[in-house]
Amino acid sequence: MEGKLFIDGQDAFTEYGIFIEHYGFKDLIAMPGFKKIDSTEWDEYDGEEYDLTNPVLDAHTLTLPFYVMNIFAAGDFFEVLSNKAYHQFEFRDIGRTYRLRLVSNNQLNKKIKIGKMSLTFIDDNSSIPTGMPMATAPAGFKQKEYMLDKIDFSRFGIYILQGTEEDVMKSPQVRENIKYDDPSRNGIIYDQEQVKYKAKQAQLKLLIYANSITEFWARYDAFFCQLLKPGNHILYIPSIYEEYDCFYKKMSITKFDILKTGKVWCEFNVILQFTNMTPSMNVMLL
């Protein structure tokens, strides 16, 4: 486990006897959500109008699960984390370095010599990645025609997983009109002039299967570089020939695994906010 994690330049395994769990990178590599975006709901239109001129990312709160090979050495580790707010964590397995600050110690389960602990950190330096989609889909890529801003998802090297279309096609909720409850009469008086719909969110279930960690980051960064740009984005679903105006809300990673071959398997969910969702024939009832 030596040479995998360095904290402020020190090998974490050699100095403190700690290392990250095999599946412990999910929180770390997840993209934070946007800060609250101002919006206005107009009575005469479906959905909401959002100010997307300059959306910014929130700070990123994440939990790292550690194995501790020597419980007594954990004290030295906490002493280092307590000597200043920010520390540099270099994760060589994933080829990334982060500047993190400790906010809580969630748990420490210990046996005679080996323990397991989860620590929560905050990355205050969230930034939008840079990258470009590939000119063409990778060789052998079998899924095409799903689009983000007229760019095929295959050019990001990303698969759309089962469950995405069903969530996108769900009908939004009806927005309630003005009503008046007169205590002197039965029932209520309801504005019957129109039926309008609330804004809705949908979850994209996505997969990146890359040949290396370098290839993974190229695909991941290119996708989020595009999705996090200011303004509305257009999602196209080929099976129903529909386009949807939307923007990024938040995301989470459900599985991240670096295989023995060096290949990377990453499943993640992206929550999109739809800005104008008038039901059509291609919707599913909730």
Image (spheres, helix red, strand yellow):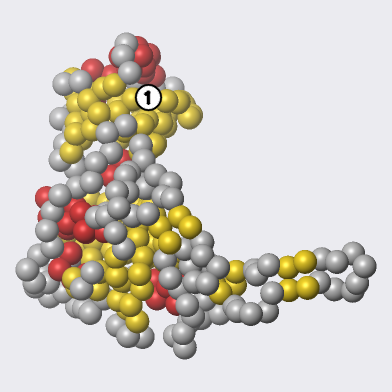
Q: Is residue 104 above or below residue 244?
A: above
| The residue positioned farthest toward the left in the image shown | 135
Q: Answer left or right for 24 relative to 15.
A: right
Q: Out of 198 and 63, give the one closest to the viewer.
A: 198
The image shows residue 19 at horizontal and vertical percentages of 28, 31
- Identify the residue shown where x is 24% and y is 55%: 229
Q: Quadrant of the N terminus?
A: top left
How many numbered marks, from 0 up? Answer: 1
- Identify the residue shown where x is 36% and y is 65%: 246
Q: Answer left or right for 246 relative to 171.
A: left
Q: Answer left or right for 248 relative to 150.
A: right
Q: Is residue 48 above or below residue 194?
A: above
- Identify the residue shown where x is 39% and y is 71%: 164
Residue 248 visible in this rendered orientation of the protein: yes
Q: Quadrant of residue 150?
A: bottom left
The residue singled out by tag 1 in the image is 102
The image shows residue 54 at horizontal and vertical percentages of 29, 48
Q: Is residue 91 above or below residue 49?
A: above
Mark 1: which amino acid? Leu
Q: Quadrant of the C terminus?
A: bottom right
